[in-house]
Image (cartoon, rainbow, N blue to C red):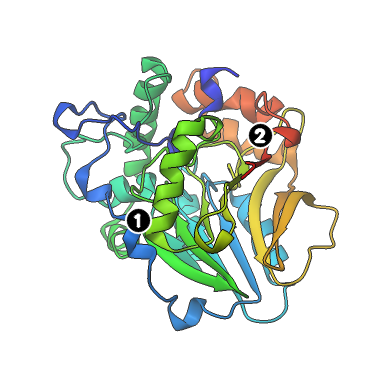
Amino acid sequence: MTQEVLLPAAKAASPTSDPLNAVAGRSCPLHYRYAPSVFASEAPERFSGLDVLYVVGGLYGNEAALKRVVELFERECGRSRMVFNGDFHWFDADPAMFARIQQTVLRFDALRGNVETELADESSDDDAGCGCAYPDWVGDQVVERSNRIHKTLRRCVTPEQQRELRALPMWLRADVGPLRLGLVHGDAQSLAGWGFAQEHLRDARHREQVGRWFDEAGVHAFASTHTCLPVFQRLASGPQAQARWVFNNGATGMPNFQGDAAGLITRIARTPFTGAERRFGVVERGVHVDAIAIETDTTAWQTQFQQLWPEGSDAHASYFNRIQHGPAYQPQDAVRQEEN
């Protein structure tokens, strides 16, 4: 996997990030932080007793993908909610397109990701850059390009749009059937956290730390995005032998697998998804959790992307290869179950 596989709109904080030694694009600002214990509460009424929940992370300003997500959601039955859990802006560096994306997203529920949080910041010091909090393994050139992309995007946002973004929460609680969920952009303790990245979840000691987050949070699963590649990771059972899952959809607005141009969302529902768009999934406590492909006209999207970000631009350098070919990642890499 090349470093370009990691999307700036979805970068998270290294566990050792030091806000006192901040570097734009690598730092994790203190106001991004929260404690896992914030999830140890009942879901608000509008998010309790759900039949269907869509978690749409990393749209990255892909308007065609947004249209397709809405079409799929509107076919669902029962008590349904859709949450855009951050980084719905990124490639939409045109004021009219930016406005359409935001207007449509805010018809539903949304969290702010690092992109939206930094766009909403009225200051101009750019201390956090894109807010991506890239880990050390991401090259400096990638970080620098991300910061410049964010500066370009800031030219599109109006004061009213900034106010709308500032009003969005960093996390939510939801219940689908008996499944208690924490909805985040990053991880259980930071908006830009890297703790639910597929790379970190390969490490047994890190999974022990994630297990402690679950103990404090009192949820069965976290649904996240931010770290660019999808992973459904089951951790060893916690107290009362309850399962603990991380459901990370990767990206809705970008390819997630080599040779597969589709984005992904996480659908969590009391009923199975019967369409051909299902890429993989699991069943937990009788609830179906599936990664659903968001398929669009690939040629049209690539043409639009290159109009906004032509060859030689920062976004083209960081992302166009992935948009064309997908990352070096396969569906069989995405579902993992830790033995008790």
Quadrant where the N terminus is found in the figure = top right
Binning the other alpha carbons within 10 Å of mark 2 as few (below 14), some (14 to 19) or many (20 upward) gives some
Q: Of helix, strand and loop, which one carries label 2?
A: helix
**Secondary structure category for the residue under label 1:** helix
Distance, label 1 to label 2, CA atoms, is: 39 Å
Q: Position of residue 27 (x, y in %)?
A: 26, 32
Q: Earlier in the sequence, mark 1 or mark 2?
A: 1
Residue lying at 16% horizontally and 45% vertically, measured from the top left:
123
Which residue corresponds to mark 1?
Answer: 36
User: Which residue is under mark 2?
Assistant: 302
Q: Position of residue 306 (x, y in %)?
A: 58, 30
Corner quadrant of residue 289: bottom right
Q: Quadrant of the C terminus?
A: top right
Q: Nearer the viewer, residue 189 or 4?
A: 189
Q: Is residue 136 left or right of residue 223?
A: left
Q: Relative to 92, is 165 above or below?
A: below
Residue 47 lies, with reference to residue 30, above or below; the image says below
Q: Amino acid at mark 2?
A: Gln
- Look at the picture and state if 25 lies above or below 9: above
In this orientation, which residue lies closer to the viewer: 235 or 227?
Answer: 235
Q: Quadrant of residue 127?
A: top left
Amino acid found under the numbered disc labelled 1? Pro
Mark 1 surroundings: few (<14), some (14-19) or many (≥20) residues within 10 A? many
Numbered-mark total: 2
Q: Confirm whether residue 334 shows in the render.
A: yes
Q: In this rendering, which labeled residue sits more in front, label 1 or label 2? A: 1
User: Which residue occupies 29% across, 57% down?
Assistant: 162
Q: Assess whether mark 2 and mark 1 are in contact (beta carbons under 8 angstroms).
A: no
Res 170 → quadrant: bottom left
Q: Nearer the viewer, residue 114 or 150?
A: 114
Residue at the image position 47 percent from the left and 42 percent from the top: 226
